[in-house]
Amino acid sequence: MCGIVGVVSQGPCNQLIYDALLLLQHRGQDAAGIATNHGNTFSMYKANGLVRDVFRTRNMRSLPGNAGIGQVRYPTAGSSSEEEAQPFYVNAPFGIILAHNGNLTNWEQLKIEMFKNDRRHINTDSDSEVLLNVLAHEIQQATTGYSLDPSALFKAVTVLHKRVRGSYAVVAQIAGYGLLAFRDPFGIRPLCIGFNETEQGTEYMLASESVALEGLGFRFLRDVLPGEAIFIDLDGKLYNQQCADNPVLTPCAFEFVYLARPDSIIDGASVYASRLKMGEYLAEKIRRTIPSGDIDVVMPIPDSSRPAAMELALKLNLQYREGFIKNRYIGRTFIMPGQALRRKSVRQKLNAIGSEFKGKSVLLVDDSIVRGTTSREIVQMARDSGAKRVIFASAAPPVQFPNVYGIDMPTRNELIAHGRSEEEVCREITADALVYQDLEALKRSISDVNPMLKNFEASCFDGCYITNDISRDYLDRIESARRNPKPVVEDAVRSQLNLNLARVD
């Protein structure tokens, strides 16, 4: 999960990109970067940290130009090193900078192809650098002469779709030409476009979530379609083309559960309205499974579960209370490395209001249960505050499988629901009772808001990987790499090089 933004404006764009990244900060707190285009020159600054900490006045002054891109990142492939912060740059053809939200499932194979066939060097273990070089190679193949036109770009993206597997929403700036954006053929990761009319002309912004557009005064135009490419030249003229053979809109369900801000609209569905529906369907299940009178009060685990908890309490005619207060200066715990660090962070992140718990049977509502560390600590905090009974409800189904499309859930044995029944998970988190949302109810929660949404990427719940290239061996390999990080791709490249040398000899 990352947040990306691209801008073609009528004036300096550095402040626009900075402000948009602040609005997308929830999508990544590991690193931030901005690159701008002025004439045929790029200026770029990126580093580890939050947006407000990465950029100083001197950095912003070094980013002139009316067009550029930016990204906030947390790592799902590669490492947390500053070298893997985005955007990435390649000098040929023309000069391209790229920022990417998602995760390529065949990036290791592509990296070998880059070395063996395309004669391109990849300097990091980032799948985004691989994606940039695939794009650069295909633009070079599609271009004749020394100029570039939209048809060549769309041809390049068409071939890229055939080579690349996984999830990707992309913004790329081409020196002296304009802004290119595209989305994978399933539309797994979100991307939308907005515009702003000025006296000088129309400005455009593309961003991961609509909140970034609306927060900066841009009018939401539409979502980028799955497989579609959009090119905006430096004069503000917009071109678009469908570049995938069989695009099927299949957005990530977890965006609606947890990742996106509630005030965003993704693929025509309000995230807030979807979460209200999750609470409504969860209330129906609780009514069927928990005896009437066993619950005194409903409490959310702040923040993303609040809409579901409010609607649930309303449907069950129960009191709604805020029992936990969140420290907003602690990062998201499920993306923090190490179980011990997560446990410590939970107590720093949440503080219980004891008077709301004392002597009560409490229904705690969370958006999801991933590793279970946070849930266990929260249940214990409720008991320590005097709760006589703690029932736990998840607005999402059990997270049983790794997510390989851009969310940091790659190891099966880290997922508390993997290989465990609902009763066993309940014991693990030490709750008195546990209720999970049904998967079909989750999907209905979103499609009720936008009936045009029929398909969802829900692999972390059902184990169905829509790119059809994920095997048990693949999952075993990425889990092994996570436990024992080593340059497996470089080993593969070295082996191929030795084989080629042997053939020459």
Image: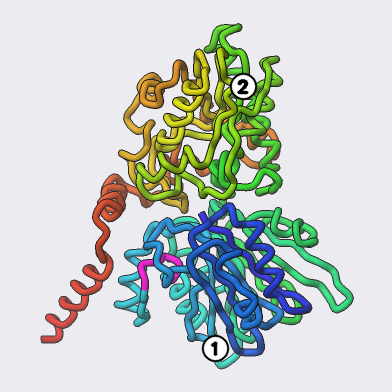
Q: Within 10 Å of the Cα at label 2, are there few (<14), some (14-19), or many (20+) other Cα atoms? A: some
In the displayed structure, would residue 347 be above or below residue 390? below
The image shows residue 114 at horizontal and vertical percentages of 35, 75
Q: Is residue 204 magenta?
A: no
Identify the mark at residue 325; answer none if there is no mark.
none
Which residue is painted at 54% across and 51% down in the image? 188
The image shows residue 482 at horizontal and vertical percentages of 30, 53
Q: Nearer the viewer, residue 253 or 237?
A: 253
The image shows residue 3 at horizontal and vertical percentages of 58, 59
Q: Quadrant of the C terminus?
A: bottom left
> Looking at the image, which residue sits at the far right?
199
**Is label 1 in contact with label 2 (beta carbons under 8 Å)?**
no
- SS of the residue at dot 2? helix
What amino acid is found at the position of numbered circle 2 in the picture?
Glu
Q: Nearer the viewer, residue 424 or 140?
A: 424
Number of disc labels: 2
> Is there any visible trace of residue 402 in the rendered image?
yes
- SS of the residue at dot 1? loop
Q: Which residue is mark 2?
A: 356
Identify the mark at residue 144; answer none if there is no mark.
1
Q: Which scheme is used to colour this image of the protein?
A: rainbow
> Is there any visible trace of residue 224 in the rendered image?
no
Q: Quadrant of residue 146?
A: bottom right
Which residue is painted at 57% across and 39% down in the image? 257
